[in-house]
Amino acid sequence: MSAVFKIAGWVGAVLIVILSVLPGGARPHTGVGGGFEHFAAYALVASLLALAYESLWARVTFVAILIIGSGILEIIQIYIPGRNAEFVGFLSSATGCVVGFAAIHLLRGYFPVFDRG
């Protein structure tokens, strides 16, 4: 089952990168606020990666990479037509990463089905 979570998590991470570098007019919109889109996308990917890897060190490393990556993607958006870098976008993404990771970390402690280690 961890292979499914690994594939889904990394596909999600790649999709975040692709959608983050598309010009503003080409990017699909959900109709909800951008902050919520950032939060939800990063929370989902962080959750999937937290489920995929047994090592706490690996899970924390991937969350850190996601957070750093979200900051880099915000900076890159300065140079993409129709996009802009927003600190609130970075904060929403980073918060989503932490919440997604923490949710799975807590579930692993309370529900044995989530604790594969």
Image (cartoon, helix red, strand yellow):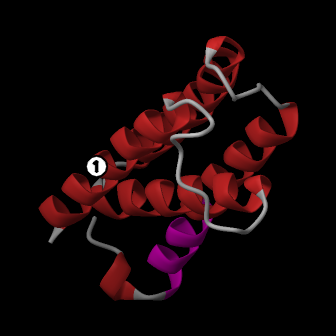
In the picture as drawn, the residue positioned furthest to the top comes out as: 79
The span picked out in magenta is 102-110
Residue 35 located left or right of residue 66: right
Decide: few, some or many residues near mark 1? Use Cα within 10 Å; few <14, some 14-19, many ≥20.
few
Q: Residue at x 36, y 86 (%)?
A: 112
Circle 1: residue type: Val
State which quarter of the image contains the N terminus: bottom left
Please identify the dominant SS of the magenta region: helix
Q: Is residue 116 magenta?
A: no
For the point 50% across and 77% down, the residue is 109
Q: Quadrant of the C terminus?
A: bottom left
Residue at 70% over, 29% down? 83
Residue at (38, 45) in percent of width and height: 15
Tell me if residue 48 comes above or below residue 1 in the rendering: above
Answer with left or right where residue 86 lies relative to residue 17: right
In-front residue for pair 105/65: 65
Answer left or right for 41 relative to 93. left
Foreground of the two, 98 or 30: 30
Image height of 72 relative to 11, above or below: above
- Residue 107 on image: x %, y %: 51, 79
Q: Which residue is mark 1?
A: 11
Task: Identify the element where label 1 is drawn.
Answer: helix
The image shows residue 47, relative to residue 114, as above or below, that is above
Residue 48, x across and y down, in percent: 38, 62
Residue 73 location, x and y as percent? 59, 25
List x then y, in percent, for residue 13: 39, 43
Name the residue nearer the viewer: 14 or 104: 14
User: In this picture, is 53 found above or below 13?
Assistant: below
Q: In the rendered picture of this protein, how many numbered marks are placed on residues?
A: 1
